[in-house]
Image (tube, rainbow, N blue to C red):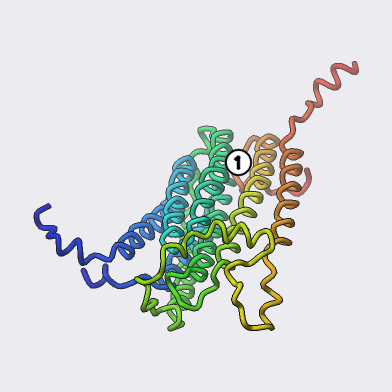
Amino acid sequence: MTMFAPSLLAALDWHTFLFLLFALLACGFAAAVVFTSNVVRMAFYLTLSLSSTAGLFFLADAEFVGAMQFMIYVGGTLVLLIFGVMLTAQSRFVQMKTNAGEWVLAAIVGSALLVLLARTALMNPDWRNPREDRNQVAVVESQTATAIGQALTGVRTDRLDASDSTLAGGMSGYLLPFEIASVHLLVVLIGAGYLARAKRRAASSSETSA
Amino acid sequence: MIDFLGSPVTVSHYMIVGAVLFVCGVLCMATKRNVLGILMGIELVLNGANVNFVAFGSNLLRERNLGLDGQLMALFVIVLAAAEAAVALAIALNFYNNHTSIDVDTADELKG
């Protein structure tokens, strides 16, 4: 540890370092999900990848979204997926390998898509250049829970000083999508409950009628 | 090396992470034989899109940004992904109960 002089630690930009750490974890575990053939391990690697993505959200000043990513995605959706994995993990289904021809085709398509997306990401100078005064951005800007709650009930408190009258019509908040999402969740609840109901076996009903 | 660790994070950094997650999800959907593996690919795709939304809405990365719009889009994507995962899992478990196989290659007949 003596080779890590204090000046090296002070010269580190901790935001960049933590971003690189979480980004490598997220991308690495996502690649592990692709390349492993054991479905139980895929579920665990996906959990780690999505947790690292929540860390990335926290570093981008989106506290509420990061917390919701942990609660809803990791703590809800992935637990549901792990339930599904455990219910269907017969010994012959735990490891299922894809044949090599499909891997070659997938590698070609995947690398082409990745090159296209990376070139698009680096294309725009507005996206490539960092913000000059990023050290003066207040921490209070990242505490978005109240603002998101108020936006979901119809009041955009972050855009109160919008001066452009043509844009002001769109500042009406997210009340309608909130209601639509609520009704959508109700429909999904009923639908999934109906699909997963216990079905009466045909053999027992014929025995009782005989 | 120190200079690379000291360069500030931009929207492009986040977009490349989002692109890698998206491509991993697409590869997962294309190559996995397990139905649950395909569902995990769908989750990765949606997460790649979420990283992009949050990056565009971030106040720390750009001065002129989407603001709360990006974060609210990401929230709605999370909610809808949870709902879709629940229904897809119900379908997958129904298929498993009827055919005793979770291999997607055995789902090759259209009659119930």
Q: Chain of mark 1?
A: B
Picture quarter with the C terminus of chain B: top right
> For this view, does A181 lie left or right of residue B72?
right
What percent of the width, then of the height, locates residue A34? 46, 54
- Give the farthest residue toward the left: A2
- Which amino acid, by three-letter code, is at mark 1? Ile
- Residue A155 relative to residue A10: left or right: right
* Residue A63 position in % (x across, y down): 48, 57
Residue B103 position within the rendered picture, expressed as x and y whole percent measured from the top left: 59, 44
Task: Name above or below for residue A108 compared with residue B99.
Answer: below
Residue positioned 55% across, 63% down in the render:
B71
Q: Quadrant of residue B75?
A: bottom right
> Which of these two is toward me, A196 or A59?
A59
In this figure, what is the number of numbered marks?
Answer: 1
B48 over A81 or under it: above or below: below
Can residue A93 be seen from the camera position used here?
A: yes
x, y (%) of residue A96? 50, 44
Residue at x 59%, y 62% (from the top left corner): B72
Q: Furthest residue to the right?
A: A209
Residue A150 located left or right of residue A51: right
Residue, x 56% and y 66% (percent of image)? B68
Viewer-nearest residue: A29 or A129? A129
Closer-to-camera residue (B74/B67): B67
Query: Is residue A101 at least partly visible in the picture?
Result: no
Q: Secondary structure at mark 1?
A: loop
Q: Residue at x 53, y 43 (%)?
A: A75
Classify mark 1: residues with Cα within 10 Å, few (<14), some (14-19) or many (20+). many
Classify the position of the N terminus of chain B by image quarter.
Answer: bottom left
Quadrant in which residue A6 is drawn? bottom left
Q: Is residue A51 left or right of residue A171?
A: left
Which residue is label 1 attached to?
Answer: B102
